[in-house]
């Protein structure tokens, strides 16, 4: 049986043991306790970050990317994709139809008719592919955010 944890604050700490990671943990503990961090930890961190800013991979120093190196795939600062725009139109229509039975199919049909640059024999497959790719992005957005997202694409 698989077990899950509801509260992430109870998750176990970082298992990586390196001089730089210990210095980072010491810094965090000192700040949390309202104390002054020791100078040795600060010097270790300063040297480590100078190397990272100089181009060294953080994984080599800290044992993890510590959020400074992006994983594979599209970088999060590249903005929205065409799939996100198509998915936003579909999601707006789904919400207008109040997620009733057949709402998704009707929304996809509307998207197929709405986009002037999606046509041909594979248009329906393209809409399906765009929805599969972009639905996670748009489902969490509010209606006003969705409308603002598609506004520049209206002709």
Image (tube, rainbow, N blue to C red):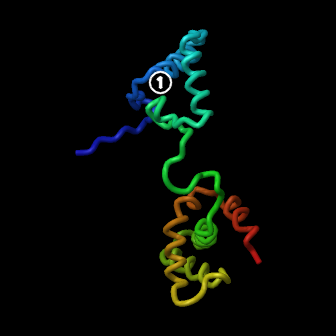
Is any atom of residue 140 visible in this view?
yes
Residue nearer the viewer, 119 or 18:
18
Q: Is residue 86 above or below residue 146?
A: below
Residue 145 pos. (x, y %): 69, 59
Residue 85 pos. (x, y %): 64, 68
Q: Is residue 113 above or below residue 65?
A: below
Q: Residue farthest to the left?
A: 1
For the point 63% across and 84% down, the residue is 113
| Residue 30 location, quadrant | top right
Is any atom of residue 95 visible in this view?
no
Residue nearer the viewer, 115 or 117:
117
Residue nearer the viewer, 146 or 77:
77
Residue 57 pos. (x, y %): 52, 37
For the point 50% across and 73% down, the residue is 129
Quick check: 1 left or right of 44?
Answer: left
Residue density around tag 1, few if under 14, some if 14–19, many if 20 or more, within 10 Å: many
For the point 54% across and 77% down, the residue is 127
Q: Which residue is mark 1?
A: 21
Residue 137 pos. (x, y %): 57, 59
């Amino acid at each position: 049986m698989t077990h899950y944890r509801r509260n992430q604050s109870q998750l176990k700490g970082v298992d990586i043991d390196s001089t730089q990671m210990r210095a980072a943990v010491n810094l965090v503990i000192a700040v949390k306790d309202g104390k002054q961090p020791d100078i040795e930890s600060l010097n270790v961190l300063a040297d480590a970050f100078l190397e990272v800013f100089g181009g060294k991979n953080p994984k080599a120093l800290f044992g993890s990317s510590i959020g400074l190196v992006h994983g594979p795939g599209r970088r999060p600062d590249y903005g929205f994709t065409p799939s996100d725009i198509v998915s936003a139109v579909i999601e707006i229509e789904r919400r207008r139809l109040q997620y009733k039975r057949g709402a998704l199919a009707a929304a996809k049909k509307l998207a197929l008719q709405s986009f002037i640059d999606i046509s041909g024999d594979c248009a329906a497959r393209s809409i399906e592919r765009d929805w599969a790719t972009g639905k996670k992005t748009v489902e969490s957005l509010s209606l006003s955010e969705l409308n603002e997202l598609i506004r520049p694409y209206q002709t």
